[in-house]
Amino acid sequence: MNTLSSKTKQDYGSDPVSVRETDQYRAEYVHAFVQKWDSLIDWDARIQSEGSFFIDKLKERGCRQVLDVATGTGFHSVRLLEAGFEVVSADGSAEMLSKAFTNARSRGHLLRTVQADWRWLNQDVHQKFDAIICLGNSFTHLFNENDRRKALAEFYAALRHDGVLILDQRNYDALLDYGFSSTHTYYYCGTNVSVKPVHVDKGLARFEYNFSDNDKFYLNMFPLRKSYTTRLMQEVGFQKIETFGDFQETYRESEPDFFIHIAEKA
Ligand code: SAM
């Protein structure tokens, strides 16, 4: 296990907004954050808010074998297993994979886990898939363009010739264009955790996760513009990209909080 991630407190040093590193993700998801997230986010409520969107999109395309590259605590991997898909669950964080494995086991599933950083995915994953999912605003953890291109190229290579990548992201355009005044508090599946931006510039969106017991955690993320993400996908070789607005939170304003990109190879 990564020693940094086993800590209970996050450590961004004396100048948190200067922390803009792709490798930071392992240190951000400290044990306490991961445990707290899962004890307060009710999976049933998340199922309600998300509906069968991803399952429908995968079934429409005849997908059977799915690689979840951002497994996190296992929510989508378990959902897809229960919907009958064959799933391999990858993540770069040992802390996350261990939590996902336990979560799946408590629901009667044995996860096939692989610890793999997206930038070198195919060193650890040798099978080809019908679909790759990268969900829960995960791609935002990559802090430079080379890393984003490399990760997308690795996803592309791990897909069959007619495979599909489903990748979501927060709607950062509104945040970048209108700043803090336009931002609201996002509630995940009720009121147990609220999320708000505490710093935004064109290279960083720092969000605060405030739990109902007043514990606070932070994530430093790169604010991806929607058109930038789709351009990168095209440049890596994806032929057809459709973008949907999604509503994963129980509270939202008129603009979608999330975009979901469905990128097809053929
Ligand atoms: N998909 C899950 C969900 O929706 O609940 C988890 C999302 S969590 C916000 C982002 C996940 O991406 C974390 O588990 C993190 O470890 C993983 N991650 C971030 N950067 C990564 C990288 N470069 N390679 C592999 N995994 C990465």
Image (cartoon, rainbow, N blue to C red):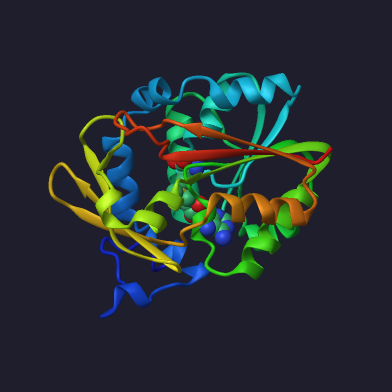
User: Who is closer to the viewer here, 148 or 252?
Assistant: 252
Q: Quadrant of residue 160?
A: top right
Residue 221 in the image: state x and y as whole percent.
Answer: 43, 60
Write the residue at 58% across / 27% down. 54
Residue 35 rendering spot, x and y as whole percentages: 31, 46
Q: Is residue 199 above or below residue 67?
A: below
In depth, the one of 184 and 70 nearer the eye is 184
Quadrant where the C terminus is found in the figure: top right
In this rendering, the answer to whether 190 lies above or below 231 is above
Does residue 203 sit above or below 169 in this rendering?
below
- Residue 160 visible to the viewer: yes
* Residue 234 in the figure: left or right of residue 202: right
Query: At 73% from the left edge and 26% from the top edge, which residue is drawn?
Result: 64
Residue 49: x and y in percent read: 39, 24
The answer, for residue 92, to whether it is visible in the render is no
> Which of these two is toward me, 264 or 106?
264
Give the farthest residue toward the left: 213
Left or right of 63 in this view: 222: left
